[in-house]
Amino acid sequence: MRCVRRLWGFTLTLIHVSAVLLVWTGAPRAGEACAAAEEQRGTSADALLLCRTCGHELATGADIRSVPSRLALSSRNHTLPGGRRVNVQLFENPHGLRFEVFTFRKADVDQHWPADKHFTWFPGFSWTAATCPRCRTHLGWAFQPSVWPNTITKSQFEESDQTFVALITHRLLSEDFASSLLMTPKSFTS
Ligand SMILES: [Zn+2]
């Protein structure tokens, strides 16, 4: 019965996450990003941040690292419980699409080399797309010094303190919020 119950919880989580995504798809972009950032309030330094699509563990609150860019359209500080300040920046790509991102010292994402030096949001750094290693959802971008070769190894990226990852706020889910979605059908509790 425990297995059935866990399966139900997981299924309901997926349904609820899908519902949240559907609601957000119809929301204005700025509001969408704000809603997601508000949700991150439940994040402490050690809390896990998950892929919103599949629940894969991407990083912890402690992995967040502020990398300010003069190219950000706006920048604001977000205070996490316990007083930890997190920088959220808004960027626009050449297609006019806007993204609010958190920057991380590291995250468990797949990079897609070769890196591109053009249209970078962080001068001095080239970028690759960053996707979820489990479900392949596009989660953001990985940045490396633009003086580096365009193609490097994953270990070179991960071992350097000059690299970082910018993840789109509304494509993340805090573990606390995910847990709050888990519920047991009443028929199992009687
Ligand atoms: Zn995923």
Image: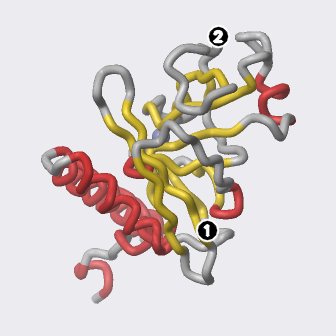
- Label 2 CB, ligand 1: below 8 Å? no
x and y, in percent, of residue 180 in the image: 39, 74
Asked if residue 132 is positioned above or below residue 45 in the image, the reply reads: above
Q: Residue at x 48, y 47 (%)?
A: 101
Left or right of 132? Residue 97 is left
Left or right of 100? Residue 33 is left
x and y, in percent, of residue 56 in the image: 54, 47
Q: CA distance from mark 1 to mark 2?
A: 32 Å
Q: Residue at x 85, y 35 (%)?
A: 160
Which quadrant of the rendered structure holds the N terminus? Answer: bottom left
The extreme left residue here reads 26
The answer to which of 138 and 135 lies nearer the viewer is 138
Quarter holding residue 114 = top right
Q: Amino acid at mark 1?
A: Ala
Q: Residue at x 47, y 54 (%)?
A: 75
Which quadrant of the rendered structure holds the C terminus? Answer: bottom left
Quarter holding residue 16 = bottom left
Asked if residue 4 is positioned above or below residue 93 in the image, the reply reads: below
Which label number is shown at residue 114?
2
Which label number is shown at residue 47?
1
